[in-house]
Image (cartoon, rainbow, N blue to C red):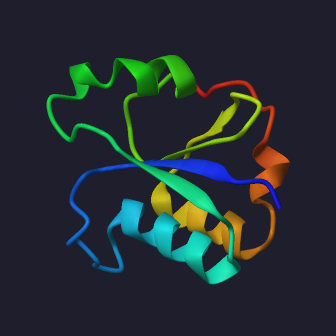
Amino acid sequence: MEKVTLHRCPFMFLKMSGHGCHQVQQALDEQGIEYTLVKTAKLPRSRRTDLQRLTGQVMLPAIEFGDGSAYRAEGKDMAAEIRAGRLFEHKGAAPAG
């Protein structure tokens, strides 16, 4: 299976069920999907230039695929897609603006 890159906030201690970055990381772990972790600056969001170039947004979390495409949605929605086995269906999609 392809390894992905998870762009998330640096607050690894936040393991609340409502925290989007944690939800996505937990779903990747549950599904056995290998990932590289990139901790992205929390604030100011204007410092997230690489993330904006990748996804068209400055919001976290985001998943980057090996082909350079990315997937970004609300954490709970991303986690649901991962758990449903549909993560890689988002590969190659145009960035959301």
Q: Residue at x 73, y 24 (%)?
A: 94
x, y percentage for residue 65? Answer: 70, 40
| Above or below, comparing residue 14 to residue 10 in the picture | below
Q: Is residue 65 left or right of residue 26?
A: right
**Residue furthest left in the image:** 44
Q: Quadrant of residue 49?
A: top left
Q: Nearer the viewer, residue 59 or 49?
A: 49
14 left or right of 37? left
Give the residue at x 81% y 32%: 92
- Give how far across and how far down residue 13 sits, in percent: 20, 72
Look at the picture and state if 96 lies above or below 8: above
Residue drawn at x 24%, y 22% as measured from the top left: 47
- Image quadrant in which you'd find residue 96: top right
Corner quadrant of residue 31: bottom right
Q: Quadrant of the C terminus?
A: top right
Where in the figure is residue 38, as x and y percent of width and height? Answer: 41, 45
